[in-house]
Image (tube, grey):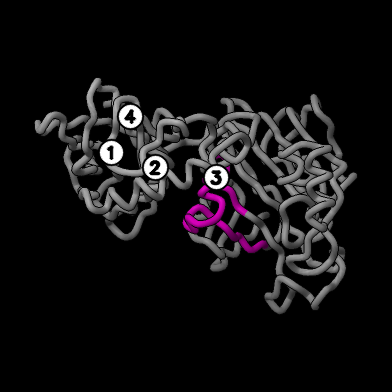
Amino acid sequence: MEISFLPQDYLINVVRRLGSNVESDVLLRALRIKNTNSEAVRIRKLSFDIRIKNKTVKQFVYPEEVLENLTQILAKNVKNFRGETAQIFLGVEGFWNNECISSIPTLKPNQETGVLLEHFKIFQKEPIDECIVSVFYTQNAKERNSICKIPIIQYKNKNRYIFPLKGTWLVVNNYDNIHTHRRCHSEEFAIDLIKLTNDFMIVPEKNCDNKNYPGYGEKIYAVADGKVVDCFNDFPENPPGFRSRLPEEKWNKFKEKYGFVAGVAGNYIILQHSGDEYSFYAHMIPGSLTVKQGDFVNQGQVIGLVGNSGNSDAPHLHFHLMNGPCILSARGLPCHFSNIRDIANERISFIEENNSIVNAE
């Protein structure tokens, strides 16, 4: 049996201290189980052993009756994982072979199955550091099992980053909301930044102009020294009104003309920093970019203005850090900031909770 997983190589653990203990938060994006035997096998059980220093602290088990349902769900979902859709969610194309997916836990030779989006939140004295996946199956009435060891690390940024905006902002779709950005490979630790009105509202008034939103036109700053490796400046903005979008036909034409990334991000910038870390800024005002591809920028330099272009419901900035220049194939990285405070005016470096309000100096 062949077992493989995504993201490749290791999973990133976001560790939050709670008193004398820590909360570990890990997402296994995808697990593939392929029958490399010359005979059919029946998967009887799938287990995840969560470990700290080679000791199991939690175990999660899917028995055969649950696997019956999971294999059906996966077979249905994999049909949609093609091209850019596969890349945006998994980071790669062809992780599963659609021609070989089984909808039941019985796998013929070269057939495969697996699971999607396994999320582990573990409360212990120390951070977790490994997940052992065990596949228990029968072959010719004999009980067998195969294992896969998945390293879990705490990622440390290679650069000292500042917040991409100044002033007070609402942080939404943070990593702890696992139903939004975190479902996408490069956006696992992405954030959306919205400026509120003095009455703590997102929308000043119904159907108001983009320019009347409090965050519209705010300056966006380079989070660290870097080089512009990709950018786009000509995508039209969405019309005024909360959750108002360009007509689908028009949006599709722009996406076809300018490409998938511009269609999703609108006007955007990707900066390369030392240590193969890349920052991504999206949904800017068309024509507002102050840089072009190949330019070198300094930390704190203005690179554009907050807008409402691309896959955007209202003026805001989408920001994330990743380990490559392409939002379709790079993996998302957590980003620590050196100049933010929380709503209690306490200095923080990492935004741990969705719907947090932070202030950047």
Q: Which mark is residue 131?
A: 1
Report which residue position mark 3 lands on. 184
Q: Within 10 angstroms of label 1, few (less than 14), some, or many (20 or more) residues? A: many
Report the quarter where the N terminus lies: top left
Name the foreground residue: 269 vs 119. Answer: 119
Q: Position of residue 126 (x, y in %)?
A: 27, 46
Determine contact: label 1, label 3, CB under 8 Å: no
**What secondary structure is marked by label 1?**
strand
Q: Is residue 115 above or below residue 94?
A: below
Q: Is residue 14 visible?
A: no
Task: Please tell me whether residue 188 belongs to the stretch shown in magenta.
Answer: yes
Position of 316 relative to 267 (above/below)? below
Q: Which residues are magenta?
A: 169-191
- For the residues labelled 1 and 2, the Cα–Cα distance comes to 10 Å
What amino acid type is highlighted by mark number 3?
A: Cys
Q: What is the three-letter code of the residue carrying label 4?
A: Lys
Mark 2 = which residue? 28
Residue 175 relative to residue 142: left or right:
right
Front one among 231 and 171: 231
